Amino acid sequence: MGDIEARLNKSAIKKGVTWDTEIDVNVAGNGIYLLNPGAPKLGVGMLEDDQATAFEKNLDVGNINPTDFSMDCDYRWDGLENVLLALLMGASPAPTQQGATAAWLHALSLANSAAGLFATYATEKLTKIHVVPSFKVMKATYSFSGGLVKASFNVRGSRVIDNSTVITAMAAVTYPANAHHRAKAYQSVFRMNAQGGADFGGSDVIKPKAFTLEIERSFDGEHVAGSQVILESKENAKPKVKLSMEFPRMDAANAAYFAEWQAGTEKKADIVITGPLIASTYYYYKKFQFPRLIIEDVEYAESKIIPAKIALRAVEADAAPTGMTGLTLPVYAGLMNTRVTSLLA
């Protein structure tokens, strides 16, 4: 059972089957390392007493509000934060083994819909296990902080309970093998050039000091008669993908962004974060690809040394650009790690 000291408590996730019905996470490999494991909080709509009386006579329990919270982590190659991204992206077929090694390549892409994709979350708190029976991932944010690659996931849960009859222990929870490996900022390579240009080369490498990648789906949170909890959330707008980069110094390359913004010059880009060796010639890596980017803001802020900042929106391409054969969706995510099954299995 858990402890009053948060550092001693386990947290776990597992893909769900039926909305608002928890699935047992007390299984080896379901553990997830989070920086804020205790974030979920139950919210209940209390029904006020507005009738004409001198004093309040009632305060009734109403519907349970959607449980919105974030899951923040240092990005780990073998960590279950990759499952969170897959739940958001919507498509993660079975991976491909590299040679006869322990390296497996996963290819995630944006599905038209994330309907039916949700998971259960559980975390220990002293003698209780707080459980979010079902949650959907609404947004993934990647960035640098303190020399590490950070990942944060905004999720919407059905509710929080502490009396589950399905998840009664966490003793069997372990973490994926090699999940202690974290991605560092210095392991990242950013490349960008014209959307209709040649494949990437050495001259296309850019070096931001900071970046923010946001992949977001917009969900509703509806109640219906006969239930205190929300229905499985459905999307009420198009997914949005935004990439922002900050450069410490204005130079000839990023000074050109201002004119390209006004001219409507479109871009393509990729981000590759390479980790330690898995086996043979195969290394851990995370790769984001953007076949078509539209500049939506450029700034050269007031400072002692003039910096530069560019914000781009990733949109669907009419055709795959050179070097990205078959890729037209706003964003793709490649992952090399040691997991042998689909991230959505």
Image (spheres, helix red, strand yellow):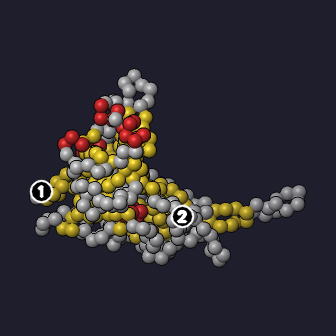
Q: Position of residue 128 (x, y in %)?
A: 50, 63
Q: Identity of the amino acid at label 1?
A: Thr
Say whether marks 2 and 1 touch (CB < 8 Å).
Answer: no
Tell me what residue is drawn at x 43 percent, y 35 percent. 299
Tell me what residue is drawn at x 70 percent, y 62 percent. 46
Q: Identity of the amino acid at label 2?
A: Asn
Asked where in the image residue 343 lies, by quadrant, the reply is bottom left
* In this view, 191 is above or below 233: above
Number of dots carrying numbers: 2
Task: Report the side of 160 relative to 213 (left or right).
Answer: right
Q: Is residue 251 visible?
A: yes
Q: Is residue 188 visible?
A: no
* In this view, 118 is above or below 239: below
Quarter in which the C terminus is drawn: bottom left
Which of label 2 and label 1 is nearer to you? 2
Q: Position of residue 184 (x, y in %)?
A: 28, 45
| Residue matched to label 2 | 236
| Residue matched to label 1 | 281
Q: Residues within 10 Å of mark 2 (few under 14, many from 20)?
A: few
Upstream in sequence: badge 2 or badge 1? 2
Residue 319 or residue 186, whichever sits in front: 319
Q: Residues within 10 Å of mark 1 (few under 14, many from 20)?
A: few
Tell me what residue is drawn at x 25 percent, y 68 percent. 95
Q: Position of residue 77 (x, y in %)?
A: 28, 56
Q: Position of residue 206 (x, y in %)?
A: 27, 40
Cα–Cα gap, marks 2 and 1: 44 Å
Q: Residue furthest top?
A: 304
